[in-house]
Image (cartoon, rainbow, N blue to C red):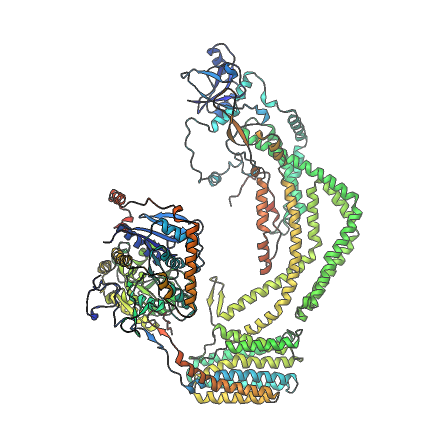
Amino acid sequence: MMDPISIAMISDFFHPNVGGVENHIYMLSAKLIHKGHKVIVITHSHAPDRVGVRWLLPSLKVYYIPFLPIASSATLPNFFTSLPYLRTILLREHIHLIHAHASLSSIGHEGILHSHLMGIRTVFTDHSLFGFDDAASILTNKLLAGTLRNVDAVICVSHTGRENTVLRGELFERSEDDPSRLVVRENVYVIPNALVADQFKPGPPRSTETINIIVLSRLAYRKGIDLLVATAPRICAAFPNVKFIVGGDGPKLIDLLQMREKYLLQDRIELLGPVRHGDVRSVLIQGSIFMNTSLTESFGIAILEAACAGLYVVSTKVGGVPEILPEDMISFAAPEEDDVVRAISEAIEIVMAGKHDPLRAHERVRTFYDWEDVATRTEVVYDTVIKSPQMELWERIQRQLGPFAGPIYTIILIVDCVFFLFLEWWMPREDLHYVTHHWDQAKYKEVRSLFACSEISAHNVLD
Amino acid sequence: MTVLVQTPKDWTKILWKRQSFQDNYIPPASFLSSLRRNSNFKPQTYWPLVLLSCAITQHISTIFIFLSIFVWIQQSKLDPRTMVWITGGSSLVGYAIWEVLDSISVKTSERYANRLKALKSSILIFLALMSLTPVLRTLTAATSSDSIWALTSILFILNTLLADYSALKNAGQVQGRLTSVLSMNAAMSASIVLASRLTADIAVFALILFSVQVFTLYPFLRHRLKASSTIIQGTTTMLLSILAVALTASLSWTITFLLSIGLLLITFLAPAFLVWAQKYKNEIRGPWDVAVPKVN
Amino acid sequence: MPTIFWPDDVRQAGFCYGWVNPAICVSGTLQVGTLEDAQEKLRQLSHVPQWEQLVKLCGSEPIILGTCEFSQTNGSRLPVLQLSMSEPVDNIFVYYYRHSPSTLRFYALETLGLDTANRADVASGSEYLKLSQHDFTEPRKRQVKSGLDDTVINQFNSALVPDGLLQNTRLHTRQNPLGFAWLTFLRLVNRRFSSPVSSISRLLACLCSVPIFPFRTSPRLKDISATIQQIDVRAEQGEFFVTEAVTVHRRSSTHISVHSARYTNFFNTVWLMLNDITIGLAFGSFLCENHLVLSRFLNRTVEDIFIIWVQRALVWLDSWPAGLKLNTELSRFYSHTFIGLVTAWGGLLLRFASCSPALIYIIGIVSCGGVTLAISVFIDLLAVLTAHIYICYAVSGAVYQRMLKTAGSLWNLFRGKRYNVLRNRTDSWEYDIDQLIFGTILFTLLAFLFPTVLAYYALFAMMRFGILILQACMETLLALLNHFPLFALMLRIKDPWRLPGGIYFSAINTPGLSHPQLVIKNQPVPFSTIFFQYIQLLSRLATHYNPLRLLRCIFSGQYLAAISRYSIRYNKIPEEHISII
C-alpha cells in the first residue's frame, strides 16, 4: 500500500458524455478514492451551462474548464491556452501526479506538457489504435510522439495497443550494451480495462427455438457494417430460426435498411435505433450470440459486456480482440464475408447444441476483470513514478524528434517555460486560494456504514 | 522492485489471466513479432509496369485523336457526315468486341438483356444528342477563342488526372467511383465547349457524338480489355499512338514531336523511374491496422 | 409584536373596526359612545345589498376591534390601540392609503392584466383551457396564516365602503365629472345606435371574410387586400364599442382590477379611434388640396421607376453586363419576354394615368375615416402598381428553383445515390450507362446556362426585396397606429395608482420617532405590460422579416412573401372558441 497522494485525471472525454473512456476514468477514480487517495478530474465544458466545479459520487471533484470542443468532444490542439487554468487548479489542489487519457484529447497533452514545470509527475493512458498511413494519423502521431517523449509512464489497455503506442510514440532507447539496437523503455505498462459484472448479469435461460444474434455498435465504416450487410442475408437464408437484433445509429443505417428491404427480411432483422447505456443489458439478454464485425478494436469492451451477460461472441480477429477472452467463449473470423459466415454458423451450432452455458460464462468473466485489480495495478505504476527522479529540462530538450519537429518542439518548451514564469509573477502562489477542505476519509467510512443497509446502486461503485 | 524471473515461454499474449510477470514486462521474442514491413510489397519489374502504363498512353492518344479531328472539322477538311459514319462504324466494331468478351464470361440469358439495354441506350443517346445540338452549338458562342482554348486544356488535364486506369475484374459493372464520373464530365464539357467554335449544326452533332463514343464508351471497353491478354493490349496501344501521331502530323510538326516524345516517356521512362524508386518504400503493417473488409 | 395595518388618513379617536383574518387590518373608526352602539351600527349594515359582496371579497365580516386614541405627545400621530380581544401591547403600525372606489385607484399584488384576450372572466369555458394555462413551474405558495395576501389587499381596497355605507351615500355614482359626462353620453348614444351599429359591423365583418374561391381553404378577401382588412378592423372596433360600453357602465359586480382593465381598454380604443380620425382628417385635407400635384408626381415616379428603369435594367443585362458573357440566346429570350410584359403593363397604367387625380381625391376622402384606412389603401395601390414585377419575379424564380433542384439530383446521380421518395432517404443505386451519359450532357448544359438564369433572377429578386421592405414599413406603421396604448400610457404618467403592478413598503422618517414608519405604496405597471401587444407584434414581424431568413429564401429560390395579415393584428374581442392549438 502506498501513501495517499493527490491525483488529477485530465481528459476531454468525461461525463456528461457516455463512452468507454469516460466510464474508465470514472470507475478508476472511484476505486482510487476507495483506496484512500484524493482524485479530481479536469475536463472541458459542455453547452449550455456545464461549466465550473461539480461533485460526483464518491467525492470526485470535476473541474469543467470553459473550452469549446469542435467535433464529438475533441478540441483543437493548442499548447498554451489552458496553462493558466491548469496551473491554478493543480497548485490549489496540491496535486502530486496527473493521469492523462486518450490521444485525441488535447487537454491531456497540454497537462503533460505543463506539469513538469510545477514538479508534478505524469502518467498517460492510451485507449485506441491508430494507423500510420492516412493524413490524420500522421499528424496525431507526431503530436503524440512529442508528448510521449517526456511522460513518466505510459499505460496501454492491451498488448497490441502497447505495440502500437510504442511504434507511434517512438518509445525506444538505444540500449547501453549495444548502441545499434533499440530497446523499448521500461515505463510502458499494460493494464486492461474492466467492467462491473453485476450490471451485466445474464437473463433467464432461453429456448433454442429462435436464436437471436445481437449487434450493438455505432453504425459506421470502422465498425465493419459492410460485413454485416453482406453476411446477414446469407445467414438468414441458411438458418431459418435465426433473428438479428441490431442496436445503434450512424451513417451506415441506410445501407442496413436497403439490405433489409432488398431481401425482404423485415421480420428477421430488427432495428432498435440508438440504445442508452442503461438499457444495454436488457437488449443483450434478448439474444444468445453477440456479433462484432469491427475492422479495428483496441480493447473491445462491448464484447466483454456481452460475454458477461452470457452470450457467445463472434468477432473479427483484429486489434486487441484475441487477447480479451479465452478461446472457448469466442469464435474468431477474418474480416472477410465467407469467413464471418463460417464463424457464425459454428457459433449457431454450438448454441443450438447447448454447449455454451451462460451462467458459467458470467462467473468466469467475473473473475477475469475487476476494477479493484485495475486500480491496484495502476497504483503500482503511480508508486514507481513517484519514486523515480524527474527529468530535467535540458534532458527534455535533448530528446530530439527529428529535423522538423525537434526545433519546433524545443521552441514550444522554451516558450512554455517563459509563459509559466510570467504567470508566476502575475498570479503569485501566495495569492492562490488553496483548497484546505476535502471529503474526509474517516467521515466517508462513517457515512458508508450509515447507508450500508440501503440498496443503492452506488454500492456497485463503492464495493 | 523485484523482477520475477520466468522463462519466456510462460508469457502469453492474453489479458484475462493475471500473469506472474509485471505489467511492464516486454517479452523479448514476441514483442512486435506481428509487425510486417512492406508486406504488400511485390517488387515490380519493368515490363509488367510498361504494360500497365499502356492505359495512360491510350488515354492521351485518344485525346489527341479527338483534338485533331476537331481541327479538321473546323477547317472543313473533313465532312461531318463522313465523321458520323465513321463514329457509327467504330461503335459497331467496339460493340462487337464487347460481345465477344461477353460470350466468354457472361451467361446467355443476361446477354439478351444486355443487348436490348445497349440498343435502347444507343437509340436514346443518338436522338437526345440530335435534339440538343442547336442548344449545344450556341452554349458558349459568346466567349472569346482564347478563353475557350484555356478552358479546354484545363478540362482535358482534369480528365487525364481523374480517369480510372485500373482493370475491371467482373463484367457488366458500370458504376465507377465519383472521380471517374467527374473525369467523364470534364471531357464532355471540354468537347461541348470546343463544339461551340463550329458553325454548322451537323458538325456539332458529329463532334459531340464522337466525343461521347471516345470519352465515355471507350473507357469501359478499355477496362475489359485490360483484363485480357497482353498482346491485345500492346497492339491496341501501338495502333492508337500511331494513329494519334499520324493525325497530328498533318497539323503541326512541333506538336507531333512533343506528342511522340511524351508518349515514349510515359510508356518507357516512367516505369523505369518507379522501379528505381521502390527501394525507398517503407511501409509498416500490423494487427493494429484498420482491416479492409472483403465482400463478394 | 403584532403588526396592524392602519389607514393613513384616520385621525379621530373612537371605536375602530376592521378585520382580524388573516391580519389585523383597521378599516376606519366610529365616533360613538359605547361598544354596543358601535356593534349595533355595524349590524345595521348587514342588510345593505353591497354587504354580501364586501363580505365575500374580504373573507369575513368587519367587526369592532377596540378603541383607539391618539396620543399627542411630541406631536406624533401614533394611535394607541386598545384591542378588545388582546392585551394592550406595543404594536407595529404599517400604514396604507384608503382610496375611494370612484377614483379607480387600488392595490394589487400582481400586475394588472391589460391583455383582454386572456381575461380571467372570459376564459371560463373549458376546464382544459384553465389547466393548460396554469403555470406549473411556480412553487405553491405556502398558506399564510397571518400576513399580507390577496384578502388583505381586498380589505385595503374596500376600506372606504363601510364608511360610505354608514354615511349613506351612493358611492358608485360619484365619479369624476368628466368620466361621468362621457359615460352618460355614451349611454345615450348606445341606446339609440347600438343595434344598427352592431348589425352594420357584423355585416361588414361577414363581407370581409368572403372567400375568393368556392373552397373552404381558399384565401379570403381580407387576406388579399389591406383595405378590406382595415375595414374589418373598424367593424370589429365598432362591435367592441357597442358591447363594452354597456358592461363598462355596469360595474357593480366585477372585481375592481377586472373592471379597471376593461375600462382602460375601452377608453383606449375610443381614444385611438378619435386620434385616427383626427389625423386622417388632416391628412385627407392635405391630399384633397394637393391632389393635382401629387397625382403628377405619382405618375412620373411610377413611370420612371417601375417601367423605364426596369426596361433599362433588362437591356443592360442582355448586353454583357459588367463584362459577364451570358448565353446570348437565353438572355435574348428572357429580356424580350420581360420587356414585353413590362411595356404592356406600362401601357395599361398609362391609360389609367388620367384618373389618378381623382384617385388621390378619393383617397383623401377615405382617409377621413382614419389615417389607417389611407395607409392600407396605399399598400394596396403599391401592390397593384408593381404587379408586373411580381409576375416576372415568380417566373424567373420558378426557373431558378427548378435548376437548383435538377443540379441536386444530378449530384446524386454522380455519387451513385438516388432519392427514395417512399422512404424519404437517399439510397445507393446503380445507374445504367445511358443515364450516366445523359446526366453528363445535362450537367454541362446546366452549368453553362446557370449564370444567365442567376443574373435575371437576381435582378427581380432584388426588386421584389425592395418592394417587400417598403411594404413591411407601411404595415409596421399600420400596426403601430392600430394598437397604440395611448390611454394606458397617459394613465401611467398622470396617475400611476390606477395601474397597479405590485406593492412595496416605503420607509418614511417622521421627526420624533426613533425608527422610520412603513407605508404601503403602489408600484406602477411596467412599460412592457402596457406595450404587451407591441412586443408580440414586433417579435412576429422580426421573425418574418429576419434578413438572414430572407437571404436564405433568395438563394434557395423560395418565394418571398409578405407577412400574413392576420398575424400582425391583435384581436380586441376575445373569441368565444379560443383554439387551443
Q: Tell whether A428 sits left or right of C474.
A: left
Residue B109 in view, yes or no: yes
Residue A447 appears at what percent x and percent y? 27, 43
Q: Tell whether C83 sits left or right of C281.
A: left
Residue A344 appears at what percent x and percent y? 30, 68
Total number of numbered labels? 0
Residue B216 appears at what percent x and percent y? 53, 79
Q: Tell whether B220 sits left or right of A448.
A: right
Between A12 and C339, the one lying in front of the other is A12
Between B10 and A72, the one lying in front of the other is B10
Q: Tell whether B43 sits left or right of A354.
A: right
Residue C49 in view, yes or no: no
Where is A135 relative to C71, above or below? below
Where is A98 relative to B109, above or below? above
Where is C540 relative to C174, above or below? below
Tell me which residue sits at (59%, 44%) in the image: C537
Residue C296 appears at what percent x and percent y? 79, 51
